[in-house]
Image: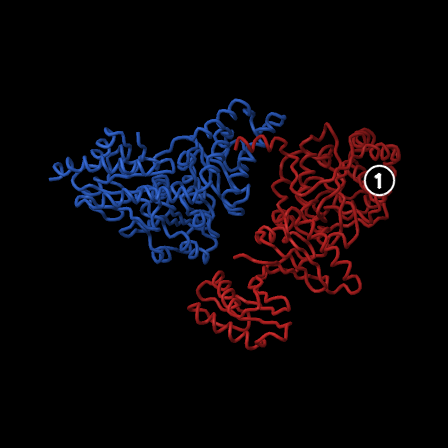
């Protein structure tokens, strides 16, 4: 089987699973307990936190554990809105965010907050001039994703950071769920960003675990109140096996990152160069530094995305329509819609998403299968 | 950028007249201490500057360590070039390009020690400036407050280029200000006070009171861990733990509630003073800040200070809590300090301690306990540990966990 759907989720690494198992079996104390057994769990919790902080060049107290990307995004958006509501009611984000951001914003709109969605160009990228123009005295949050989950566009994070240096009071959030381990850490953990969302299962950790980076000194209201874990910002007994497993997964992910990124880029390029030759194919991702190395999105005119996905599945290749979240709802991709791609084309889009376990041989296999299927698709399309 | 040496400039040292030689020697020792573990470094503490020849070591790591050494005003990473003007031009250009962002200005600042060199100062400034203007589009020259100052020193053994000045920790070299004890509880304040004491050149011995079972092993480990954090500024620190249970129990039993705290503090200071004298130290540092808690009013200080004639030094005396926290965060002790373990100052705290204890009453109530006997018992139970920077006390399983992670 060839798994090309790593932006939906990744396979947990066996070494990571082994950490999960060992911690579940041996270090199952509650980190909040006073006795030695709890103390041991507390120490592992903090050591995991430190490892993650060190890997990202942050300090230990700036890492807060969550249940994953959706919680992280919800938290930063709503937590900022609650914390800073007396300073303003305006939030800025992009038209191509993950639903975890988009729908949080929509919910806030119903509560009286105002939201600006920055438009994107034909590459799915916002313009810095639009960002500048959108900022108001009442703006409290700017939230921009690092890498688009549907087509892989990298947003101009550093430029946005420069703009926001003139507005030191605005919270700047980056959703880095698709961006970590893809060679752009320097752009994400830039010197202006205040909050960053990460999700474990996108980098071979188990489900149900993630974390946010929260710059020291920046305040955010908790969404989960209770026993006061995570410095009273996110209550709930810590999911220690998953946290330790995620700390390990992150270390493995960032080891030899450059080589892994180069490998993914080479696989993407091989498929990109191949499918581009076919007249019915429209590519949305590009093969340049403005796009992540692991996501390739294209459409085959006249064939629905689902049809393509299932056709490849029969040949043992797993891809997806644009995002796992929207695929079952048969909706047109929101990113492509924001890029003003006509609906008849955007419903024909599919996404290939890679990681470092994929190989060039798999790309060749994909291309062969593509050739076979294309002949069938041609008939469908006509 | 591969730097060949770090040039260190002294701070206040240079004004220390006859002591200057000792100061420089001590700073040299401290720098050597803090750079322990790097191989092949050549450290020379000279009259006007200290040079660390890197011999292939990574400059950023060395710089990180130097940032924690008191007595350094600032330092610059330097590249040594042979006396070949073409090489100087190339290196200068690379250094500017590494720092240049659009809109920046620069100037060249040349000093010439070797008067045999083919060009004089002005010629060097001119030629290098011209070379950079030609090759870095958009850069401008500015004589006053430029963004980048490229320093060129033509010495007998080569030409030394530097373009960055990194602020050092300031203060005086630890050890030049004598030795004192520090009463370290484990809260936010005492590590900051210790840091400030060391900044003025004082070498500190940590005195920590612990009262098992009222205080936990974790509280003791936390105090040791805090010591290892600040040991980064001192090389290594003696950690003196004093058993205090019996004293506290006796005071609790015999002394009226309002005076519990005052007399407890007097006993602590007495013991600290005895340790100070026995070790040849010259004073006692504390983390007290005026008005912060009941024991830190002027009246309390007077009643407590009554037990010794040694100088009791309080670097935080006029600082606000927020200022103290800022420093604690800077020296990375804050997160540790706020870990919630009971220390011996927080147990047995009466609900309403006297904020204005009366000195005469204090002295009289104290007669209810056997001061000398209790003191001696505590002093007999002292344990001294030498703590090095980066040692781990809180998490004994760190290495086991490291394999899991």
Nearest the viewer among A176 and A338 is A176
**Residue B227's spot in the image, x, y percent?**
69, 42
Image coordinates for residue B120, horizontal then vertical, percent = 58, 77
Badge 1: few (under 14), some or many (20 or more) residues near its Cα, within 10 Å?
A: some
- Note the chain letter of the red one: B
Residue where numbered disc 1 is placed: B362
Q: Residue at x 85, y 32 (%)?
A: B377
**On screen, residue A184 above or below A309:** below
Residue B256 horizontal side relative to residue A236, left or right: right
Above or below: residue A354 compared with residue B147 = above
Q: Is residue A194 found left or right of B185 in the rendered image?
A: left
Q: Which corner quadrant of the image does residue B158 belong to? A: bottom right
Q: In the current view of this chain or complex, which residue is farthest to the top?
A: A25
x, y (%) of residue B331?
Answer: 63, 48
Chain A shade: blue
Left or right, B8 with respect to A305, comes to right
Residue A18 lies, with reference to residue B195, above or below; the image says: above
């Amino acid at each position: 089987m060839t798994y090309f759907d790593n932006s939906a989720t990744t396979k947990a690494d066996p070494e990571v699973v082994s950490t999960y198992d060992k911690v579940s079996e041996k270090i199952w104390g509650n980190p909040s307990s006073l006795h030695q057994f709890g103390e041991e769990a507390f120490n592992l919790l903090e050591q995991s936190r430190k490892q993650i902080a060190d890997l990202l060049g942050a300090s230990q107290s700036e890492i807060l554990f969550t249940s994953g990307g959706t919680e992280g995004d919800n938290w930063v958006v709503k937590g900022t809105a609650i914390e800073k509501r007396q300073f303003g009611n305006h939030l800025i984000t992009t038209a191509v965010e993950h639903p975890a951001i988009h729908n949080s914003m929509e919910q806030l709109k119903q509560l009286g907050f105002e939201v600006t969605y920055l438009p994107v160009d034909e590459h799915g990228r916002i313009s810095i001039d639009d960002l500048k123009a959108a900022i108001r005295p009442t703006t409290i949050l700017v939230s921009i994703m690092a890498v688009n989950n549907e087509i892989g566009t990298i947003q101009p994070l550093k430029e946005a950071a420069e703009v926001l240096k003139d507005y030191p009071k605005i919270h700047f959030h980056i959703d880095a769920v698709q961006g970590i381990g893809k060679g752009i850490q320097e752009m994400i953990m830039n010197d202006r960003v205040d909050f960053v969302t990460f999700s474990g299962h996108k980098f071979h950790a188990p489900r149900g675990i993630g974390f946010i980076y929260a710059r020291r000194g920046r305040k955010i209201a908790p969404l989960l109140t209770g026993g006061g874990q995570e410095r009273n910002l996110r209550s709930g007994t810590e999911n220690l096996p998953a946290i330790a497993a995620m700390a390990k997964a992150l270390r493995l992910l960032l080891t030899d990152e450059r080589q892994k990124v180069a490998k993914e880029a080479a696989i993407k390029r091989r498929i990109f160069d191949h499918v581009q030759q076919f007249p019915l194919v429209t590519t949305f991702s590009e093969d340049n530094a403005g796009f992540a190395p692991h996501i390739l999105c294209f459409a085959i005119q006249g064939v629905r995305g689902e049809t393509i996905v299932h056709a490849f599945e029969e040949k043992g290749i797993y891809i997806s329509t644009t995002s796992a979240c929207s695929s079952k709802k048969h909706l047109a991709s929101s990113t492509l819609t924001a890029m003003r791609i006509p609906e008849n084309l955007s419903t024909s889009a599919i996404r290939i998403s890679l990681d470092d376990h994929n190989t060039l041989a798999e790309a060749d296999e994909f291309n062969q299968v593509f050739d076979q299927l294309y002949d069938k698709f041609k008939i469908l399309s006509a | 950028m591969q730097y060949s040496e770090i040039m260190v400039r002294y701070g206040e040292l240079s004004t220390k007249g006859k002591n200057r030689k000792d100061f420089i020697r001590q700073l040299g020792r401290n720098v050597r201490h803090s750079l322990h573990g790097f191989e092949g470094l050549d450290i020379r503490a000279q009259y006007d500057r200290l040079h660390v020849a890197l011999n292939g070591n990574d400059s950023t790591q060395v710089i990180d360590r130097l940032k924690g050494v008191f007595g350094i005003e600032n330092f610059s990473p330097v590249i040594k070039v042979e006396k070949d003007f073409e090489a100087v031009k190339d290196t200068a250009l690379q250094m500017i390009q590494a720092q240049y962002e659009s809109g920046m200005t620069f100037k060249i600042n040349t000093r010439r020690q070797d008067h045999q060199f083919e060009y004089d100062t002005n010629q060097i400034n001119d030629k290098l400036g011209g070379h950079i203007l030609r090759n870095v589009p958009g850069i401008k020259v500015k004589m006053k407050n430029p963004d980048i100052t490229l320093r060129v020193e033509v010495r007998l053994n080569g030409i030394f280029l530097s373009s960055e000045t990194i602020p050092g920790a300031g203060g005086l070299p630890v050890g030049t200000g004598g030795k004192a004890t520090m009463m370290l509880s484990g809260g936010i304040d005492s590590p900051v006070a210790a840091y400030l004491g060391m900044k003025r050149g004082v070498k500190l011995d940590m005195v920590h009171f612990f009262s098992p079972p009222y205080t936990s092993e974790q509280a003791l480990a936390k105090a040791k861990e805090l010591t290892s954090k600040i040991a980064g500024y001192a090389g290594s620190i003696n950690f003196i733990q004093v058993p205090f249970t019996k004293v506290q129990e006796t005071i609790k039993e015999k002394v009226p509630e309002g005076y519990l705290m005052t007399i407890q503090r007097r006993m602590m200071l007495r013991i600290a003073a005895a340790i100070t004298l026995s070790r040849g130290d010259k004073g006692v540092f504390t983390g007290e800040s005026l008005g912060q808690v009941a024991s830190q009013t002027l009246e309390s200080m007077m009643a407590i200070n009554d037990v010794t004639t040694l100088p009791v030094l309080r670097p935080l005396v006029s600082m606000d809590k927020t200022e103290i926290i800022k420093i604690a965060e800077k020296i990375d002790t804050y997160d540790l300090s706020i870990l919630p373990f009971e220390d011996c100052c927080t147990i047995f705290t009466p609900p309403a301690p006297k904020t204005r204890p009366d000195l005469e009453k204090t002295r009289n109530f104290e007669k209810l306990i056997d001061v000398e006997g209790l003191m001696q018992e505590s002093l007999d139970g002292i344990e001294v540990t030498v703590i090095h920077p980066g040692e781990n006390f809180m998490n004994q399983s760190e290495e086991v966990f490291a394999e899991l992670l």
